[in-house]
Amino acid sequence: MKEVIATSVFALLVLAVRAPAADGDRFWPQWRGPLLTGAALQGDPPLTWSETKNVKWKVGIPGSGSGTPVIWGDSIFVLTAVPSPKGASVLQFTILAVSRKDGKTLWQRVLREERPHEGTHATGSFASASALTDGEHVYAFFGSRGLYALDMKGNVKWEKDLGDMTIKMGFGEAASPALHGDRLVVNWDHEGESFIVALDKRTGKEVWRQPREEATSWSTPLVVVVGGKAQVITSATSRVRSYDLATGALVWQASGMTANVIPMPVHSDGLLFLTSGFRGNALLAVRLSEAKGDITNSPAIVWRYDRDTPYVPSPLLIGGQLYILKSNNGILTAFDAATGKKLYGEQRLEGVPNVYASPLGVAGRVYIAGREGGMAVVQQGPEFKQLAANQLDDGFDASPVVVDNELYLRGKKFLYRISAN
């Protein structure tokens, strides 16, 4: 990887996983990657591909889901909702382990089988969350269908039912849990009694729970370490809030984002970035060392931006630069993360008109997958340059993943490994 990752940024790795002793950098343990920014630790995947070029393998995934695959060692973990033979809209909520080498299924477990109590958005799925792994266990979250901890061979160790969500407009559930040390954190924002809860990852036992005055949000919480203490940061419409991971106590808060908050926050070098873009535009840059109490109008907010922000995709933070997409469109803006200076803006990407997936950063490039099967590859840096426009016979809502020199794409029908060999 060409970018120099500062020590303080690299330390973010411990927020979610232990460093793998035997696997080197062969892991992507949660949907925004090992640094929780969308950036890879290393790798140099292909620049160009097609159905007949640089596709090492392509395998069908049963059912449907838009959660990003996660990887540890030679195993890829994918969540999906598979129609049951029982019919009547009954689904089998399933996790699969797939071999990186050849795409063969290593194991498959149905964790729950039931008819969902309410629907989902026409462009959504009943398996929109991504799995998490720490190399010892893999955690599968299906929202109202429960949270499950499995060992790496697929044996269920514990499960937790948090109840049934009532989602705004029946748009469906999507947020993934956060993992830090021995804690799993689930944000449960819906049209009922919202809350945030921390669980012991070894047993599923609740450590603390805090009520939240929030309607539905779909944003995954982010854990960061500030002054030696871990905080859980949540982005939502009413308020942005940070909680002490150890106790659940509120550390700071600020005025909220737009309606229907989906993007996950990102953090590096002491700066936190929050975005949303439905019926409005919001981007806040927060200096966490100064964030205490209500920071809405305080110097802790070091810069703001109020146009062309993302609705579904999360930002990419890499090499001191912040990349965002406009709404759900293939229109890219880049900032100097420290100052908020716009490096370039509103650059339309060739071959990627509609985007739900979040950008990936690796090898001095930015990879952006589209809903119609295209993927734009853009040069990382202060000047916009599109390097490639690729096309496959699928559509991509799940975010791209890279391990070693291999790019993994979870489509509506297929899972691809893109690699030169």
Image (cartoon, grey):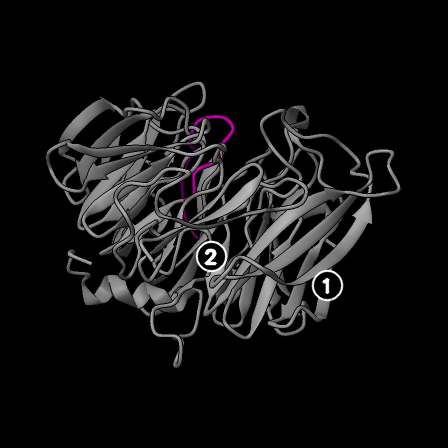
In the rendered structure, the answer to whether residue 234 lies left or right of residue 326 reads: right
The main secondary structure of the magenta stretch is loop
How many residues crowd mark 1 within 10 Å: few (<14), some (14–19), many (20+)? Answer: some
Residue 262 magenta: yes
Total number of numbered discs in the rendering: 2
Task: Where is residue 374? Give x, y as percent.
Answer: 38, 30
Identify residue type, mark 1: Glu
SS class of the residue under badge 1?
Answer: strand
Q: Which mark is residue 408?
A: none
For the C terminus, the image quarter is: bottom left
Is residue 356 shown above or below 308?
A: below
How far apart are the alpha carbons under marks 2 and 1?
Answer: 19 Å
Pinpoint residue 231: horizontal percent, then vertical percent: 42, 59
Q: Which residues are magenta?
A: 251-264
66 or 141: nearer the viewer: 66
Q: Which residue position holds label 2?
A: 30
Label whose residue precedes the other's in the sequence (2 or 1): 2
Compared across the picture, whether 48 is left or right of 5 comes to right
Classify residue 19 by image quadrant. Answer: bottom left
Q: What is the three-letter code of the residue carrying label 2?
A: Gln
Q: Where residue 176 sits in the image (x, y, percent)?
A: 55, 49
Q: Quadrant of residue 387?
A: top left
Marks 2,1: beta carbons within 8 A? no
Judging by the rendered image, the residue that carries numbered circle 1 is: 159
Residue that sits furthest to the top in the current view: 279
The residue at the far left in this view is 383
